[in-house]
Image (cartoon, rainbow, N blue to C red):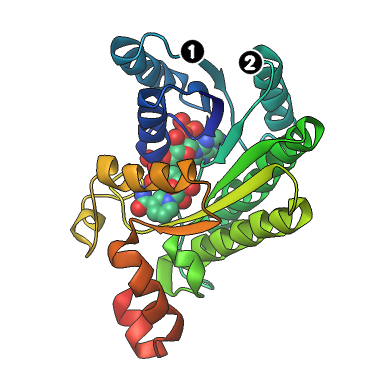
Amino acid sequence: MSTILITGASSGLGAEMARQFAALGHDLALCARRTDRLEDVRSDIAATHPDVRVSLKALDVTDHDAVFRVFEEFREEFGGLDRVVVNAGLGKGQPLGTGRFDVNRETAETNFIGALAQTEAAAQIFRAQNAGHLVMVSSFSALRGMPKNITTYAATKAGVAHLAEGFRADVHGTPIKVTVLYPGYIVSEMNDEADQKLTGMVSTEKGVRSMVDAIEKEKDSACVPALPWAPLSVVLKHAPLPVLKKLM
Ligand SMILES: NC(=O)c1ccc[n+]([C@@H]2O[C@H](COP(=O)([O-])OP(=O)(O)OC[C@H]3O[C@@H](n4cnc5c(N)ncnc54)[C@H](OP(=O)(O)O)[C@@H]3O)[C@@H](O)[C@H]2O)c1
């Protein structure tokens, strides 16, 4: 049993990870902006796993001072943190040069600078403990520069994957571990109804089961679910541009 901090735990993958980690007996430190939704997650867990300790805090990951404060408060409350899942993210975006710097910047600030703050805060705690497991939720789209609405999103996800890999190189040979996840299409609030018809889309429960499995095994990196995303990752990296445009 360990203590796991999850950001963006109010919906989608974060909320379902909380439920599945609770089923494995882990205590949980959950944060997001929508605290009413966090309360719903805590109630679900209390009904099914009453022995699991769940603490909630409001957090906007673009408030960088708050990220450091909240992580530290959770550490003090639980007497340490065994795992931090950097999960909070935003899927907004428009093609470059179409007048929507505002939405692309919002995505970049949440997904990259927000993730940098979370990684710094977690890394500081793990270095002091000489233990801990950093989990970075990247995306399948990080594997290549992407066209259309996901250009900025994909760039942020490539950035956070490298951030985590760089930290792994720093802590190599120590008890600190780093996992980078590359999820394919998994049902969540981020995917609207149209997206839910995308090839390879799986239920939240199934997609997150694959994420939790990779995390529990402390894999260095994983495409989740492995099928079809692991073989598709090879195709994606080498596809000629016209094929890439059709795929994405
Ligand atoms: N679903 C997929 O197919 C898929 C694929 C690849 C990667 N991912 C990644 O998985 C992660 C979770 O996304 P999801 O699919 O579960 O989407 P989601 O249901 O929209 O969940 C996003 C979560 O991030 C939180 N969040 C967003 N902006 C935030 C901010 N400024 N501060 C704090 N929390 C914030 C939201 O909480 P509040 O709004 O309550 O703050 C929410 O809990 C994201 O990093 C996403 O990029 C998802």
Considering depth in this image, is 114 or 144 the residue closer to the camera? 144
**Number of residues whose C-alpha sits closer than 10 Å to that of mark 2, classed few (under 14), some (14–19) or many (20 or more):** some
Q: Is residue 99 visible?
A: no
Task: Identify the element where label 2 is drawn.
Answer: helix
Q: Amino acid at mark 2?
A: Phe
- Residues under labels 2 and 1: Cα distance? 9 Å
**Number of residues whose C-alpha sits closer than 10 Å to that of mark 1, classed few (under 14), some (14–19) or many (20 or more):** some
Q: Is residue 114 visible?
A: yes
Q: Is residue 213 above or below residue 104?
A: above
Report the quarter where the C terminus lies: bottom left
> What residue does disc 2 label?
78
Q: Is residue 186 above or below residue 39?
A: below
> Residue placed at 35% from the left, 81% from the top?
245
> What residue does disc 1 label?
53
Is 123 left or right of 241, judged from the image as shown? right
Ligand 1 rendered quadrant: top left
Q: Amino acid at mark 1?
A: Arg
> Residue placed at 50% from the left, 60% from the top?
153
Q: Is residue 47 above or below residue 237?
A: above
Residue 45 horizontal/vertical position (percent): 35, 17
> Residue placed at 52% from the left, 32% from the top?
6
Q: Is residue 20 above or below residue 176?
A: above
Is 205 left or right of 98, judged from the image as shown? left
